[in-house]
Image (cartoon, helix red, strand yellow):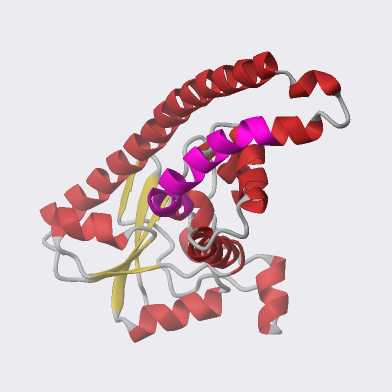
Amino acid sequence: EIGWRTVVLLGGIFGFFFFAGLWRERRRAEVAPFAAYWVVMFVAMGLIFTFHAPHGAYYHSAAAWLPFAFPMAVAATGPALTGLGRVWAFLRRPQTHRFVEVAALVGAVVLSLVGSVTLYRLWETSHQRDLAAAGYLTDAGLTDDAVLYGDPASLWHLTGNPGVAAPFDAYPVIQEVVRAYDVRWVIVTLREDATIDPLGLWNGCAAQDSADNSAWTGGPDTTATWLGCDPVFEAEGVRIYAVVE
C-alpha cells in the first residue's frame, strides 16, 4: 500500500521516473545517503509501522525525502524516455520529452489538489471526533485519567489527559497495556463511512478478537472482557468505554 502512496506523493508518473533517477545517479556520492535513508524508511514503514504508516505516518515522513525525490524524478524524465526509445523511437524525440514533463507536472498538481482535499476531509472528520471525546472528558471532570486512544497526542492537546496509543495486537496484549498504564477509559472512533474500528472494540465487552490474533496467542477467539458493555459516552463515530478491571 505504501508503494502506491509513494507514487501518489510523487504525482503519479513521476513515481516511475524517481526510481529511474535513483538508478541513473546511483554512483553519485551525494545520492548514497538519501538512497540509504529512503530504503530504511520504506522498509520500516512497511514492516514495522504497519498500522500507522497507511494512516498518516508515511505522509509525514515525506517532508524529509520528497523535496529531494521530486526534482530527481523530473530531471530523470528525459534520460529515462531516451533509454526507452531503444524500444520505441518516438520516446527519443525532444518534443515527446517536453510533452511528458508538462503533462506529468499538470497531473501532479491536480493529483496533489485532489489528495489534499481528501486528506483534509478525513482529518476534519477525525478532529470532530477528537472534540466530541474531549468535550465529554472535560465536562465530566475526567481530564486527569489515563486513556487508551488511537491519537493520544491530539487528545492531550485538547484536555491534558495522559494517554497511550492502542497497539495493533491481540486483545490480551491490549489488556496488558491497559493494566500497565492504569488506563481508565478507552476511546474508540470510526473512520469515515466505517461500521467497525480496526481493532474491533466498537462493541465494548462484546467485541470479538480476530481469528488471526487468537491463533497468534494460542487460544480461542477472545472478547474484550476488560471493557464495559455500554459506552459512557457516544456521539457520531466515537464511543468511550470504562475499563472494568
- Please state the total of marks drawn on the protein image: 0
Q: Which of 146 and 117 is in front in this view?
A: 117
237 shown above or below 220: above
Observer-nearest residue: 123 or 159? 123
Left or right of 66 in this view: 3 = right
Q: Is residue 236 left or right of residue 47?
A: left
Quadrant position of residue 5: top right
Give percent across and percent down for residue 52. Answer: 48, 58
Q: Quadrant of residue 83?
A: top right
Residue 125 appears in the rendering: yes
Q: Quadrant of residue 125?
A: top left
> Taken as a whole, is the magenta stretch helix, strand or loop?
helix
Q: Does the magenta stretch include residue 74?
A: yes
Membership of 22 in magenta stretch: no
Height in image: 132 above or below 163?
Answer: above
Location of residue 96 with respect to 116 vertically, above or below: above
For the C terminus, the quadrant is bottom left
Q: Compared with residue 143, is residue 245 higher up or lower down, i.e. above or below?
A: below
Rendering coords of residue 123 (x, y %): 36, 39
Classify residue 84 as left or right of residue 94: right
Looking at the image, can residue 197 be seen? Answer: no
Q: Give the image location of residue 231, x and y in percent.
A: 36, 56
Which residue is found at the position 64% from the left and 30% from the top? 78
Magenta range = 58-79
Where is residue 101? Give x, y as percent: 58, 23
Residue at 67% from the left image edge and 18% from the top image edge = 94
Left or right: 152 with respect to 143? right
